[in-house]
Image (cartoon, rainbow, N blue to C red):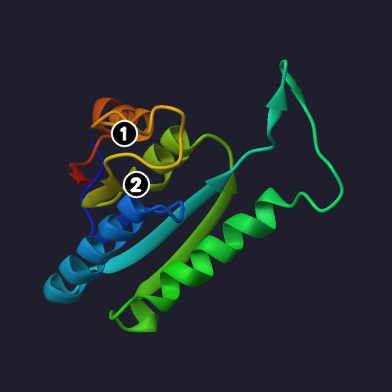
Amino acid sequence: MPELTSMVVVGVDGSAQSMAALKWADSYATTTGARLRIVTTWVWPLNYGSAFGYEGLTPGADALSVLEKARAELTIPETRVETVCREGGAGPVLVAESKDAALLVVGSHGFGAIGRVVLGSVSNHCVNHDSCPVLVVR
């Protein structure tokens, strides 16, 4: 098992639930002196198994915008914050980005099709696959 660090990882997607997770992680990191890694992901939309797009579709740029908005909400000193924007599924990326973290913080559900369920697919994936403690914020 990897040695725990003073890194707190939080997943954001711009939803109210992820912003609540960010607020909790910011407060926790500020109180404990931990560093904070804010992670967002993006994927190309699929249509019948094939990627599709249209002029002006910029999922990577949209994800960077989510990170900028999230970073603007923080109270923790900038020197203790890093951001990560990666292409891929949110669950696997969050698990990979938190493999050496002390804690992963996620919202209970976001913009996914399962958003009406109490525990969303991303938080469920993280709880079942991560090697560090996972806090799901409702």
Residue 5: x, y in percent? Answer: 23, 57
Q: Of the residues shown, which amino acid type is indicated by label 2?
A: Ser
Residue assigned mark 1: 126
Residue visible at 51% across and 58% down? 84
Residue assigned mark 2: 98
Question: Residues under labels 2 and 1: Cα distance?
Answer: 10 Å
**Is residue 35 left or right of 41 when viewed as pictured?**
left
Q: Please identify the residue farthest to the left as the structure is shown.
A: 31
Q: Is residue 29 visible?
A: yes
From what the image shows, is residue 119 above or below residue 74?
Answer: above
**Splitting the image into 4 quarters, where does residue 38 fall?**
bottom left
Q: Which of the pair 24/3 is nearer the observer?
A: 24
**Is residue 63 left or right of 39 when viewed as pictured?**
right
Q: Which of the pair 39/4 is nearer the observer?
A: 39
Q: Is residue 8 visible?
A: no
Residue 9: x, y in percent? Answer: 32, 55
Q: Which of marks 1 and 2 precedes in the sequence?
A: 2
Q: Nearer the viewer, mark 2 or mark 1?
A: 1
Q: Secondary structure at mark 2?
A: loop
